[in-house]
Amino acid sequence: MLKCWVAFPTYDASRGRLFTWASNIGQNLAIDLLRKQRRRALRTLTLSEELATTQVALTTFHPEHIGVREWVALLLPTDQQLIDLLYFQGYTQVETAEELQVPLGTVKSRSRRIIRMLSRIVT
């Protein structure tokens, strides 16, 4: 309410109702407060904690444990090869296109199609 009281000289009745104007001030203050809290939380997270979290996640994730390879085995051999290069061997899309000797756009569209197909199989 204090913010509305201080900002009242800027209120213009021709642009809307007083209630709407005051409500927007309250809404903007709430958004600012949430953003401020989020920034503060990010600042408290140090780089070492972030690296430790990343390292733990990388060393503990094994796609074999969730059956990804079995799902990929359901695909056509050409699709299996594409997914193997991209996700299991860590190739970039450009490197995969060079390896398979196909255009980059083809690699992108095929990988998108395969991921959609796998998501339908899994769910």
Image (spheres, rainbow, N blue to C red):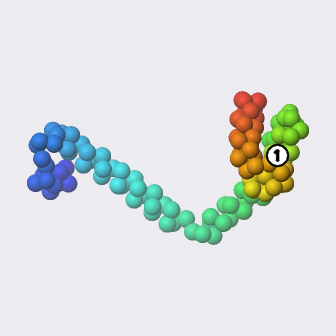
> Residue 89: horizontal and vertical position, in percent?
83, 54
**Which residue does the image show at 41% across and 56% down from the upper left?**
35
Horizontally, is 95 left or right of 36 in the view? right
Type of amino acid at the residue the image marks with label 1: Leu
Q: Quadrant of the C terminus?
A: top right
Horizontally, is 10 left or right of 34 in the view? left
> Residue 5: horizontal and vertical position, in percent?
14, 53
**Which residue does the image show at 20% across and 54% down from the upper left?**
3
Quarter of the rendering containing residue 92? bottom right
Is 3 rendered above or below residue 21? below
> Residue 68: horizontal and vertical position, in percent?
81, 41
Q: Is residue 86 visible?
A: no
Q: In this rendered view, identify the residue nearer to me: 96 or 34.
A: 96
Horizontally, is 6 left or right of 72 in the view? left
**Which residue does the image show at 72% across and 62% down from the upper left?**
55
Q: How many marks?
A: 1
Density class for disc 1 (Cα within 10 Å; few <14, some 14-19, many ≥20) is many
Quarter of the rendering containing residue 94? bottom right
Q: Is residue 81 visible?
A: yes
Q: In this rendered view, identify the residue nearer to me: 92 or 72.
A: 92
**Which residue does the image show at 73% across and 59% down from the upper left?**
56
Is 4 rendered above or below residue 53? above
Give the residue at mark 1. Answer: 82
Please tell me whether mark 1 sits on a helix, a strand or a loop.
Answer: helix
